[in-house]
Amino acid sequence: MEHRIRVNVVVVDDPERAQTLERSMAVRLSAATGVVPDVRAVAVPSADAVREAGRAALALRPEPIAPPELRPSTDRLADVLSQEWPAGVVGPLLDCHIEVGPAGAARVRLIHFGGALGAPAEQMLARNLSAAAGEDIGVVDVSLPVEPLSAASPLGEAWVGQVAPVLDEVGRYDGVYACIGVPAATRARRDAAGGGHDEEDSVRNELSGAAAGVPGGQARVVGDTAWTLRVQTDPCPDVDSIPAGSPTDARGAPLDPATEAARD
């Protein structure tokens, strides 16, 4: 945390003595605190002038930074995005969120399924959005995976580390779901090998805990034929609706055996 010291002093003396006092106080405060202070000594000719000088010193305080008024410009921001969003390259825009930080800095989070915008496109969008809003606006690109992520094996912490950031993003937005597929046959393979607690069980438990931490039930562990992660706009199938080892479709829902037999 950054610390600041500001001191305003009014003295009945001549300007030269006031400057000497200002320098002396600055050195002493800096030595005592380790912070470079902002010290201002104002000299006045008489005690009657102290009140006026005091009001002038108070005026030196910076005004609090007010958050930019973005509501009137929301329509203009939407117009820019509708005209300039490169849907054909990075996929359609799913949602956007306007955030204002404590220092008044505004930014727009742009959520979409597809590839990343890239720095040049982010800079151009930020410039055009800022011009439309009349405020400096930053752009945060949030690209969600179109295709399922998968791993041949959970690879311990590596797979959990790949899934966790996606769950963090999913938890920020309504209408987005993360379906975490785990092989339902893991326990059967472990029992056939003589029992015991293996690494896959540890990963399964970590993924279950991570899913439980996502608000609104937007993440769920489901049975699958492999270790997968699907991000989608439909809710995940119920965890108990997929029999152990059952194949699933692209949304993580169980496949109809009759339909699959007909395809074969």
Image (tube, rainbow, N blue to C red):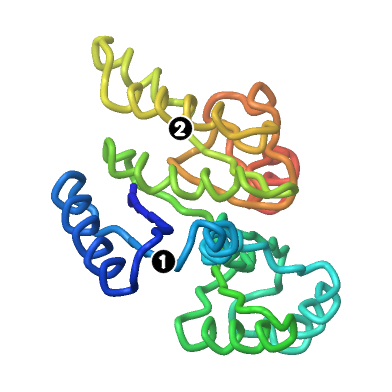
| Residue 8 placement: quadrant | bottom left
Q: Is residue 254 above or below residue 22?
A: above
Residue in front for this viewpoint, 239 or 100: 100
The residue that label 1 is drawn on is 42
**Which residue occupies the foreground of this view, 83 or 2?**
2
| Residue 93, quarter of the rendered image | bottom right
Left or right? Give the position of 139 relative to 162: right
Could you tell me which secondary element the residue under label 2 belongs to?
strand
Out of 79 and 71, give the one closest to the viewer: 71
Which callout, 2 or 1, points at the residue further toward the start of the chain? 1
Decide: is 130 above or below 196: below
Q: Quick one: SS at disc 1?
A: strand
Which percent across, then down, holds residue 159?
34, 43
Specify whether 42 is left or right of 57: left
Q: Amino acid at mark 2?
A: Pro
Name the spot of residue 225 as percent of width and height, x first: 49, 38
Residue 35 point in image, percent of width and height:
23, 53
